[in-house]
Image (cartoon, rainbow, N blue to C red):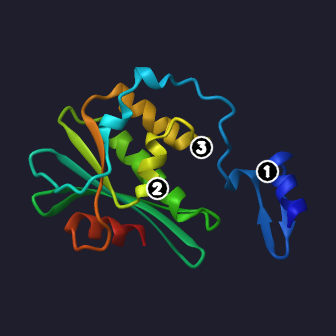
Amino acid sequence: MGAVYIRVARLITSSNLSDSNFSPNHFERKLSTVNLNPALYNIKDRINLGDHQISEDIINILTNGSKIQDKTGSAYCLWSYNTVTEQWMVILNGHNSVFQAEIVAIREACIRACQFSKQSTIWSDSNSSLLSASSFKSESPIPYYIQQILHNSTTINLAWVKAQDGTPGNESADHLAK
């Protein structure tokens, strides 16, 4: 197993183990350098990890990621007045983790929220994904990309929503991700 890891992760070549083929394209690459200056960003003010209620006077986008057996899904839905008004979903590679599915959903929701001129909140029940998006020490390119979007758009915020508590929009996103 160690030799496969070395070939795939460090030498960036495909490798086989048992009946599985591992390709470097199946995995995220670490960022070699990050050129963000935390003093120039107000990221911590834009990501709320406290318990809040969904407000109907803004655009709400609820995200979710899920992994069942070898199927990993990522999804978001726009939620307005107790109705899903738009949805997005994708099936990721079976090697992807739930964390990766969650962070991809947040990234895609941020990209969609950039198209609105109105205030938007992107809700996630993944505390770890939100913490990663708020950290300047992440080696993953996806949280870095989310930070760039938040820096360039003053109308987008991220917030945490409690999982499995019956929040209708969150339950819809969870269903889409599966």
Q: Which residue is mark 1?
A: 9
Residue depth check, mark 2 versus mark 3: number of the one nearer the observer: 2
At mark 1, the secondary structure is helix
Q: Secondary structure at mark 3?
A: loop
Q: Earlier in the sequence, mark 3 or mark 1?
A: 1
| Residue occupying image coordinates x 76% and y 56% | 23
Of tags 2 and 1, which is closer to the observer? Answer: 2
Disc 2 from disc 1: Cα separation: 23 Å
Q: Which residue is mark 2?
A: 128
**Could you tell whether 11 is left or right of 50 in the image?**
right
Looking at the image, residue 132 sits to the left or right of residue 29; the answer is: left
Q: In the image, is 12 to the left or to the right of 107?
A: right
**If the image is split into quadrants, where does the N terminus sit?**
bottom right
Q: Position of residue 128 (x, y in %)?
A: 46, 55
- Of pointers 2 and 3, the one earlier in the residue sequence: 2
Q: Earlier in the sequence, mark 2 or mark 1?
A: 1
State the residue lying farthest toward the right. 3
